[in-house]
Amino acid sequence: QVHLVESGGGSVQAGGSLRLSCAASGLTFSSHCMGWFRQVPGKEREAVAALYTAGSVTYYADSVKGRFTISHDNAKNTLVLQMNSLKPEDTAMYYCAAEEGISDWVVAGAPSDADFPYWGQGTQVTVSS
């Protein structure tokens, strides 16, 4: 059984930084896709950043490029999202997601929540102006 547990959310002023972590367990493939999504009430969940653990492929939403960095610690199977220069519009519930093996978006396109069968419970990020 796959478990994803997020931590590191909180409240910060605009321009500040937060670091989100996602501890994964139960994934059986040696490589997999993992990502961070976010959602605000009344809007669809959107992909923020994602990666394929066996390669150098990463995805970033245009709105976070240059400010957020996604990384994966293979030994600990932990996904990290370093968020710098935070803006009020980054306020959302952030979710960690995982998929066994490789996904189509690694080759071309962008990840969607339909690509990921496993989800964490979410962690709230609030950025005040």
Image: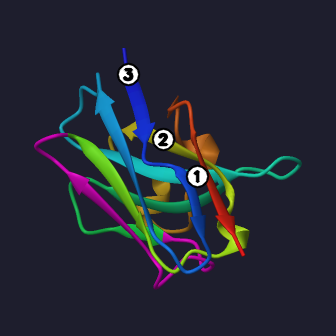
Amino acid found under the numbered disc labelled 3: Val
Structural crowding at the residue carrying mark 3, measured as other residues with C-alpha within 10 Å and reported as few (<14), some (14–19) or many (≥20)? some
Compared across the picture, whether 74 is left or right of 3 comes to left
The residue beneath circle 3 is 2
Q: Relative to 56, does residue 85 appear above or below in the rendering?
A: below
The residue beneath circle 1 is 37
- Please say if the residues under marks 2 and 1 sit with CB atoms less than 8 Å apart: yes
Structural crowding at the residue carrying mark 1, measured as other residues with C-alpha within 10 Å and reported as few (<14), some (14–19) or many (≥20)? many
The residue beneath circle 2 is 97
Q: Nearer the viewer, residue 30 or 90?
A: 90
Toward which corner of the image does residue 14 lie, by quadrant?
bottom right
Compared across the picture, whether 110 is left or right of 66 comes to right
Residues in magenta, as a range: 60-76
In space, the residues marked 3 and 1 are separated at their CA atoms by 18 Å
Toward which corner of the image does residue 88 lie, by quadrant?
bottom right
Amino acid found under the numbered disc labelled 2: Ala
